[in-house]
Amino acid sequence: MNIGILALQGAFAEHMKMLETLHANGILIRQKSDLSHPLDGLILPGGESTAMGKLLFDLDILEPVRERILEGLPVFGTCAGMILLAKQLEDSPIRHLATMDITVRRNAYGRQLGSFTTTAAFGNFPSIPMTFIRAPFITQTGNSVTVLSTVNGNKVAARQGNQLVTAFHPELTDSVAVHSYFLNMVQNWVTGEKA
Ligand code: GLN
Protein backbone atom coordinates (compact mmCIF):
# COMPACT_ATOMS: atom_id res chain seq x y z
CA MET A 1 0.00 0.00 0.00
CA ASN A 2 1.31 3.44 -0.93
CA ILE A 3 0.35 6.10 1.59
CA GLY A 4 1.18 9.73 0.91
CA ILE A 5 2.12 11.83 3.94
CA LEU A 6 1.81 15.58 3.54
CA ALA A 7 5.28 16.77 4.53
CA LEU A 8 5.13 20.55 4.26
CA GLN A 9 5.34 21.12 8.00
CA GLY A 10 4.69 19.36 11.31
CA ALA A 11 4.87 15.78 12.58
CA PHE A 12 5.18 13.82 9.33
CA ALA A 13 8.30 11.76 10.21
CA GLU A 14 6.45 10.02 13.06
CA HIS A 15 3.69 8.91 10.68
CA MET A 16 6.36 7.50 8.38
CA LYS A 17 7.71 5.39 11.27
CA MET A 18 4.20 4.11 12.06
CA LEU A 19 3.71 3.07 8.43
CA GLU A 20 7.09 1.31 8.42
CA THR A 21 6.05 -0.62 11.53
CA LEU A 22 2.88 -1.70 9.72
CA HIS A 23 4.75 -2.56 6.48
CA ALA A 24 3.07 0.13 4.38
CA ASN A 25 5.01 2.35 2.01
CA GLY A 26 5.04 6.02 3.05
CA ILE A 27 5.58 8.65 0.35
CA LEU A 28 6.37 12.19 1.46
CA ILE A 29 4.33 14.80 -0.39
CA ARG A 30 6.31 18.03 -0.55
CA GLN A 31 5.27 19.46 -3.92
CA LYS A 32 2.65 19.09 -6.61
CA SER A 33 4.64 16.59 -8.68
CA ASP A 34 4.76 14.19 -5.71
CA LEU A 35 1.02 13.67 -6.20
CA SER A 36 1.75 11.79 -9.42
CA HIS A 37 2.92 8.78 -7.35
CA PRO A 38 0.18 6.16 -7.26
CA LEU A 39 -1.46 6.73 -3.88
CA ASP A 40 -3.86 4.45 -2.01
CA GLY A 41 -4.29 6.82 0.94
CA LEU A 42 -3.11 10.12 2.37
CA ILE A 43 -2.12 11.29 5.86
CA LEU A 44 -2.36 14.95 6.90
CA PRO A 45 -0.15 15.34 10.00
CA GLY A 46 -0.37 17.59 13.01
CA GLY A 47 1.47 20.88 13.08
CA GLU A 48 0.14 24.35 12.46
CA SER A 49 -2.98 24.36 10.32
CA THR A 50 -2.70 28.01 9.25
CA ALA A 51 0.85 27.49 7.99
CA MET A 52 -0.02 24.16 6.36
CA GLY A 53 -3.12 25.58 4.69
CA LYS A 54 -1.14 28.50 3.30
CA LEU A 55 1.61 26.20 1.96
CA LEU A 56 -1.01 23.91 0.37
CA PHE A 57 -2.44 26.92 -1.42
CA ASP A 58 0.90 28.52 -2.39
CA LEU A 59 2.27 25.23 -3.77
CA ASP A 60 -0.92 24.73 -5.79
CA ILE A 61 -1.74 21.41 -4.16
CA LEU A 62 -4.83 22.43 -2.19
CA GLU A 63 -7.22 21.85 -5.10
CA PRO A 64 -5.65 18.62 -6.43
CA VAL A 65 -5.63 17.12 -2.92
CA ARG A 66 -9.21 18.26 -2.35
CA GLU A 67 -10.30 16.63 -5.61
CA ARG A 68 -8.61 13.34 -4.73
CA ILE A 69 -10.37 13.28 -1.36
CA LEU A 70 -13.73 14.05 -2.96
CA GLU A 71 -13.10 11.19 -5.43
CA GLY A 72 -12.78 8.85 -2.44
CA LEU A 73 -9.05 8.64 -1.71
CA PRO A 74 -8.90 7.58 1.98
CA VAL A 75 -7.48 10.37 4.13
CA PHE A 76 -6.42 10.50 7.78
CA GLY A 77 -6.00 13.92 9.43
CA THR A 78 -4.39 14.24 12.86
CA CYS A 79 -4.88 17.43 14.87
CA ALA A 80 -3.97 20.23 12.41
CA GLY A 81 -4.84 17.69 9.68
CA MET A 82 -8.33 17.46 11.16
CA ILE A 83 -8.58 21.28 11.03
CA LEU A 84 -7.59 21.19 7.33
CA LEU A 85 -10.41 18.73 6.57
CA ALA A 86 -13.16 20.50 8.55
CA LYS A 87 -15.91 22.20 6.57
CA GLN A 88 -16.21 24.71 9.34
CA LEU A 89 -13.96 26.22 12.00
CA GLU A 90 -15.75 27.66 14.99
CA ASP A 91 -15.75 31.46 15.16
CA SER A 92 -13.76 31.75 11.95
CA PRO A 93 -14.56 32.17 8.27
CA ILE A 94 -11.35 30.29 7.34
CA ARG A 95 -11.59 26.93 5.55
CA HIS A 96 -8.87 24.82 3.97
CA LEU A 97 -9.74 21.51 2.26
CA ALA A 98 -13.25 21.68 3.73
CA THR A 99 -14.26 18.13 2.71
CA MET A 100 -15.57 16.73 6.02
CA ASP A 101 -18.88 17.65 7.57
CA ILE A 102 -17.54 18.68 10.98
CA THR A 103 -17.15 21.94 12.89
CA VAL A 104 -13.88 22.17 14.79
CA ARG A 105 -12.77 24.41 17.63
CA ARG A 106 -9.05 25.16 17.42
CA ASN A 107 -6.94 25.18 20.61
CA ALA A 108 -10.07 23.94 22.31
CA TYR A 109 -8.44 23.16 25.66
CA GLY A 110 -6.81 26.57 25.92
CA ARG A 111 -3.14 27.16 25.26
CA GLN A 112 -1.98 26.19 28.75
CA LEU A 113 -4.00 22.99 29.12
CA GLY A 114 -3.65 22.08 25.49
CA SER A 115 -1.06 19.34 25.98
CA PHE A 116 -1.85 16.16 27.86
CA THR A 117 -1.92 12.39 27.53
CA THR A 118 -4.84 10.15 28.41
CA THR A 119 -6.37 6.81 27.46
CA ALA A 120 -9.83 6.29 26.01
CA ALA A 121 -11.78 4.05 23.66
CA PHE A 122 -11.36 4.40 19.90
CA GLY A 123 -14.04 2.65 17.87
CA ASN A 124 -13.90 -1.03 18.87
CA PHE A 125 -10.58 -0.62 20.69
CA PRO A 126 -11.47 -0.39 24.40
CA SER A 127 -8.50 1.76 25.38
CA ILE A 128 -5.68 3.42 23.48
CA PRO A 129 -3.16 6.09 24.55
CA MET A 130 -3.89 9.58 23.21
CA THR A 131 -1.49 12.51 23.13
CA PHE A 132 -3.04 15.95 22.72
CA ILE A 133 -0.92 18.98 21.79
CA ARG A 134 -2.70 22.35 21.64
CA ALA A 135 -5.50 20.21 20.36
CA PRO A 136 -8.78 21.01 18.69
CA PHE A 137 -12.00 19.07 19.20
CA ILE A 138 -15.13 18.59 17.16
CA THR A 139 -18.15 20.64 18.23
CA GLN A 140 -20.64 19.59 15.54
CA THR A 141 -21.00 16.67 13.15
CA GLY A 142 -23.15 16.12 10.07
CA ASN A 143 -25.50 13.13 9.74
CA SER A 144 -23.02 10.96 7.86
CA VAL A 145 -20.25 11.41 10.45
CA THR A 146 -19.58 8.67 13.03
CA VAL A 147 -17.87 9.69 16.26
CA LEU A 148 -15.18 7.15 17.20
CA SER A 149 -13.84 8.66 20.46
CA THR A 150 -14.88 11.09 23.13
CA VAL A 151 -12.72 12.40 25.95
CA ASN A 152 -14.39 14.31 28.81
CA GLY A 153 -17.52 14.51 26.68
CA ASN A 154 -15.69 16.08 23.72
CA LYS A 155 -15.54 14.42 20.32
CA VAL A 156 -11.92 13.70 19.46
CA ALA A 157 -12.08 11.15 16.64
CA ALA A 158 -14.56 10.69 13.81
CA ARG A 159 -15.09 9.17 10.40
CA GLN A 160 -17.15 10.12 7.37
CA GLY A 161 -16.84 7.64 4.52
CA ASN A 162 -13.14 7.47 3.66
CA GLN A 163 -12.20 10.43 5.86
CA LEU A 164 -10.79 9.73 9.33
CA VAL A 165 -9.78 12.41 11.85
CA THR A 166 -8.28 12.45 15.33
CA ALA A 167 -7.75 15.51 17.52
CA PHE A 168 -4.90 13.60 19.18
CA HIS A 169 -1.59 12.31 17.84
CA PRO A 170 -1.54 8.48 17.66
CA GLU A 171 1.82 8.67 15.86
CA LEU A 172 3.39 9.98 19.09
CA THR A 173 2.31 6.91 21.08
CA ASP A 174 3.36 3.27 20.88
CA SER A 175 -0.12 2.13 19.82
CA VAL A 176 -0.62 1.31 16.15
CA ALA A 177 -4.42 0.99 16.59
CA VAL A 178 -5.48 4.11 14.70
CA HIS A 179 -3.00 3.61 11.86
CA SER A 180 -4.11 -0.03 11.56
CA TYR A 181 -7.72 1.15 11.43
CA PHE A 182 -6.81 3.62 8.66
CA LEU A 183 -4.86 1.01 6.66
CA ASN A 184 -7.89 -1.25 6.92
CA MET A 185 -10.03 1.55 5.42
CA VAL A 186 -7.44 1.89 2.65
CA GLN A 187 -7.37 -1.86 2.04
CA ASN A 188 -11.17 -1.96 1.73
CA TRP A 189 -11.10 0.93 -0.73
CA VAL A 190 -8.34 -0.64 -2.84
CA THR A 191 -10.18 -3.98 -2.88
CA GLY A 192 -13.46 -2.26 -3.76
CA GLU A 193 -11.84 -0.31 -6.60
CA LYS A 194 -10.45 -3.45 -8.16
CA ALA A 195 -13.57 -5.55 -7.61
N1 GLN B 1 -3.19 24.17 17.36
C1 GLN B 1 -2.74 23.73 16.07
C2 GLN B 1 -3.53 24.41 14.95
O1 GLN B 1 -4.48 25.09 15.20
C3 GLN B 1 -2.87 22.24 15.94
C4 GLN B 1 -1.93 21.57 16.88
C5 GLN B 1 -1.42 20.23 16.44
O2 GLN B 1 -1.55 19.84 15.26
N2 GLN B 1 -0.79 19.54 17.35
O3 GLN B 1 -3.19 24.27 13.84
Image (cartoon, rainbow, N blue to C red):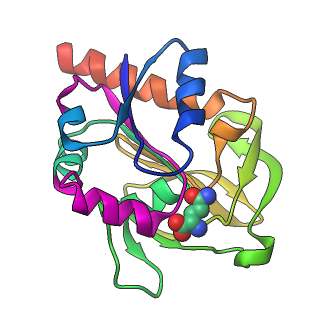
Span shown in magenta: 36-63
Instruction: Identify the residue at horizontal 65%, vertical 34% (top origin).
Output: 124
Specify whether 132 is left or right of 55.
Answer: right
Question: Looking at the rendering, in which quadrant would you find the N terminus?
Answer: top left
Question: Looking at the rendering, in which quadrant would you find the C terminus?
Answer: top left
For this rendering, which residue is in front, 86 or 188? 86
From the top left corner, tell me how far across and down residue 76 is, in percent: 45, 42
Q: Is residue 46 found inside the magenta-colored segment of the image?
A: yes
Is 62 rendered above or below residue 92?
Answer: above
Point out the quarter of the image occupied by ligand 1.
bottom right
From the top left corner, tell me how far across and down residue 51 is, in percent: 42, 65
On the question of residue 143 being in view, the answer is no
Instruction: Identify the residue at horizontal 56%, vertical 30% (top origin).
Output: 179
Specify whether 79 is left or right of 42.
Answer: right
For this rendering, which residue is in front, 9 or 66? 9
Which residue is the extreme one toward the bottom?
A: 91
Number of numbered discs present? 0
From the top left corner, tell me how far across and down residue 8 is, in percent: 40, 49
On the question of residue 78 being in view, the answer is yes
Is 106 rendered above or below residue 116?
Answer: below
Q: Is residue 69 found inside the magenta-colored segment of the image?
A: no
Instruction: Identify the residue at horizontal 68%, vertical 57% (top origin).
Output: 150
Specify whether 94 is left or right of 14.
Answer: left
Dividing the picture into quadrants, the one containing residue 39 is: top left
From the top left corner, tell me how far across and down residue 21 is, in percent: 61, 16
Is 82 rendered above or below residue 18?
Answer: below
Dividing the picture into quadrants, the one containing residue 139 is: bottom right
Dividing the picture into quadrants, the one containing residue 123 is: top right
Instruction: Identify the residue at horizontal 46%, vertical 54% (top origin).
Output: 81
